[in-house]
Amino acid sequence: MADKKEKPEVGEVKKEEVAEKKPASSAKTATTKSTAAKPAAKTAASKSTAAKSATKTTESKSAEKKPTAAKPAAKTTATAKSAAKPAAKTTAAKSMAAKPAAKTTAAKSTAAKPAAKSVTKSSAKKPAAAKPDEVKPVAEPEIVEEIKPVAQPETVEEVKPVAETPAPEAIVPDTVQPEQPVLPVTEVKEEPAKQTIMQKTAGAFKTAGAKTKAACVSAASTVKGWFVKGKPVEATVSEGDVNAEMKTVLSGSNLSTKERIIRFCRSQTGWLFVLPAVVLMCIFTLYPIFNAFIRAFMENYMPTNKAHPFDGWGFENFVRVLKGDTGMGGANFWQCLLNTFIVTIISVPLSILIALLIAVALSSIKAVRKAYQTILFLPYLTNALAMGAVFATFFQIIGTKSNTETIGMVNNFLGWFGISPIDWLNPNMHAWGSGTVKVYWASYLVAIIYDVWAGLPFKILILFSALQSVNKQYYDAAKIDGASRSKVLWKITAPMISPMLSYLFITGIMGGMKSYSSIVGLFGEQMGRDFNMGTVVGYIYQYIDKGQTGYAFAGSLLLFVIIMIITAISNYVSKKRVTYT
Amino acid sequence: MAKKSKNTENIEEVVESLNPVEVPVAEETVKAETDGSVVSAKDSTLDQTVSAVKTDAAIFNRQGVDVDIVKERKKQKILHISKNVFVYAFLTVCAVLAFLPFYWMIISSVKTEMEFREPNPTFFPHTFKWKNYAAVLTQTSSSTSGSFWQILINTLTVGLISTSIGVIVTIVTAYALAKMNFKGKNLLFGLMMATMMIPGEMYTITNYLTISSWHWNNSFTVLILPFLVSVYYVYLLRNNFMQIPNSLYQAAKVDGLSDMGYLVKVMVPLTAPTLISITLLKFIGTWNSYIWPRLVNSPNWQMITNWVTRGFVDRGGELYGGFYSPSEPLNTLKMAAVCMVSLPLFILFICCRKYIMHGVSKSGTKG
């Protein structure tokens, strides 16, 4: 700003160019003002809608006048700029039709922002072309204006009136507008012919100061108006004003009900955008949730019997499901729950651990990383049923070990260690416990191996990107402080990736409790001899197939409650252990 | 203490390697420095520490350091090489284990059934039986499954339509949730987020009942419509849209662009990578869908994963001359079927690997 003081001529020349550039680069509604703006800018005393350029020229000149530091100058520029908008608003409101005025106001004030930005670039370019050594002092004040966030909320506010007005009305301001700038310019033109340059500049300073003060006052009253509740003040109509009707419509307090409704409806166009999604979600997501809650409590629900669809309201469905005896044959709920729970609780942490090791290994090599990543990502694309069948062939026993029958690759492998072959896919053969609920450890192992293999690529991807995103500065600081490698691992790496770890854990458990396709792929549609190895979801589908939807609803509600409990516990634990940056 | 000395030694080494001139320092001064910095001379309980520090100081002695630097450098190099070897070995083992099922699948599909059932499984087939694929492709539709071509057409149709319409609906919804202001926007978004937590099985039963009452069974609409909008992708795309600055919107408004025009001409090109990822993941999701088609459609209208679960038999003994009974499911045929189901996804992956991985890591779902 000190440099600016030294070369006022450049400043003046630049301001002219600025005044030219601004209307030229803003919307077409403002192009008609550009010719008017030029002489106005020269005298710097116009009351036209190029008041922004005027305030800009005046404010920077007033900054030159007061040799203060750049900050207060920047403050005045910022406040003058923000004041220019409500000033422009009120000035436009005084004189135009309501809707076109709103559009032009918004267009002008929104034009101010991109205009300001383009001005920065253009003013940075122009002086560079003209006098290369003055780029820096010239460019500075505009950049300072840009950074100030004060101007930001104004533009957001003005988006709304723009959304209200439909596009076809854009024609109106073009025709109506040119009237306004013509009047004041004609007044001003008489002055410069009689004054000297010194008198001109002195007069310009005075009017600039007055304008700034007026703009600040009006800005302050607008801000005050946001917080002071009360009846909105009607815009005063001055005498001889051409477009007096416009003001009364704009103030909004005397719209008819019909107009209010139209205006409100126009502002809710967002609902049209989300309509398909909302309709589909209501039918297929929200309604089923309510329905599930209601139907689960209807006893003996039979939709085919129209006269007597259900017996009554009660917990019988739940009691029957939890007792494990539904009188229909089929799976036992507790067995299914145990299956699901054990497989999930073992496979998810194991999978995360292996994925972490692989991710750490991947991030410490550089050479062939992409090839390894591609190969390790392959299991993601597979279908659970297809790959389940492939895994089943590893474990399958067809007959006995003879010349024409095989006992599977895994059993052969175990045979080297002298372990007798295990019938992996037949749950009943190897089970602990002897009640109705058994632990089929062999089949669990098969399911765990498959789940770990299938869940690995996703976890590797997420953990790898989490490891890469840890800020390298932490490691450098640790090196400087002489931290050992285990300290670096536990104190820096682990906390930084803990959000991802907890996310993987929670989603892994939620997905694991809902597993179904993998079990069908491994054990076949019967899930191992009469649904022994079924999961909770398999239980639900089994009862859908049988037509007993009551038990299916009860089962699904129980599943929902269980998942909620597990998620709540995981959330609680992660809040304590996870550090979020 | 040994560890500490090693670390400090490394730093010493680094510093010395930078310093070209080696200045001989007297032992006593070094000792005095370390004594002063580590422990106070009057403290008797820390004598042990002092003696340990003194041995460190002995190592810091110029003559001792010269020999140790070379040894240390050798040791570090060996450690570095062995670390790299270990890491590469571990990664190779993991890659082999990850790839093993695919390899097994491919070679099993061209084996003869006898060779498949040998007591010691072979890793490379003796004889190649390409007729497996022909037999699988020509299996006619039965009571439990349709023919391959019909199923393939089903899957491709459903996949393409569902993906295209679904992506459009997702874009529009995410744009409205990100940029527009309308009453109840936050409530709607909160509701959508809440439904993410609920297991899909709760909807399935009621949806099945709804669809049965509307008689939508055995059609394509029932496969497409219920899962058109996936809340995960709406959430992901909304976050992407919110990152685009508002000034672009205002500049577009100034130029007279409507909301829809802004969406099509500005937002979509800017978020193109994410959109490609979402498209690919949606397509992979429809390809892998199993439960819903099995529930609502008859076998001729089902998807390709349903087709895989059928048992493939040697009808009419054309493959093995009646060696296997007509009702015995053959594993090699099943492997051939699995190969064909997985093949399109592999091709897709090879073409668009970057987008798929980018989309998975951003959205965090499997589709």
Image (cartoon, coloured by chain):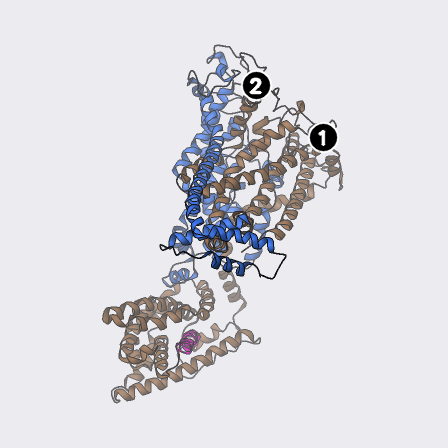
Residue ID at (53%, 59%): B35
Indicate the position of residue A496 as horizontal and vertical percent values: 53, 51
Q: Residues within 10 Å of mark 2 (few under 14, many from 20)?
A: many
> In the image, is A300 to the left or to the right of B363?
right
Residue ID at (45%, 65%): A159
In the picture, the quarter occupied by the N terminus of chain A is bottom left
Q: Which residue in the structure is indicated by mark 2?
A: A407
Q: Which residue in the structure is indicated by mark 1?
A: A437
Who's blue, chain-wise?
Answer: B
Q: Which amino acid is tagged 1?
A: Val
A446 w.r.t. B214: above or below: above
Q: Toward the viewer: A357 or A87? A: A357
A551 w.r.t. A432: above or below: below
Q: Which residues are magenta?
A: A67-95
Sequence-wise first label, 1 or 2: 2
Indicate the position of residue A58 as horizontal and vertical percent values: 35, 80
In this rendering, the label closer to the viewer, 1 or 2: 2
Which shade is chain A?
brown
Q: Is residue B116 magenta?
A: no
Indicate the position of residue A332 as horizontal and vertical percent values: 70, 31
Q: Toward the viewer: A569 or A111? A: A569
* Marks 1 and 2 belong to one chain: yes
- Residue A299 makes an appearance in the image: no
> Magenta residues: mostly which secondary structure?
helix
Q: Toward the viewer: A420 or A550? A: A420
Q: Which amino acid is tagged 2?
A: Ile
Q: Is residue A89 magenta?
A: yes
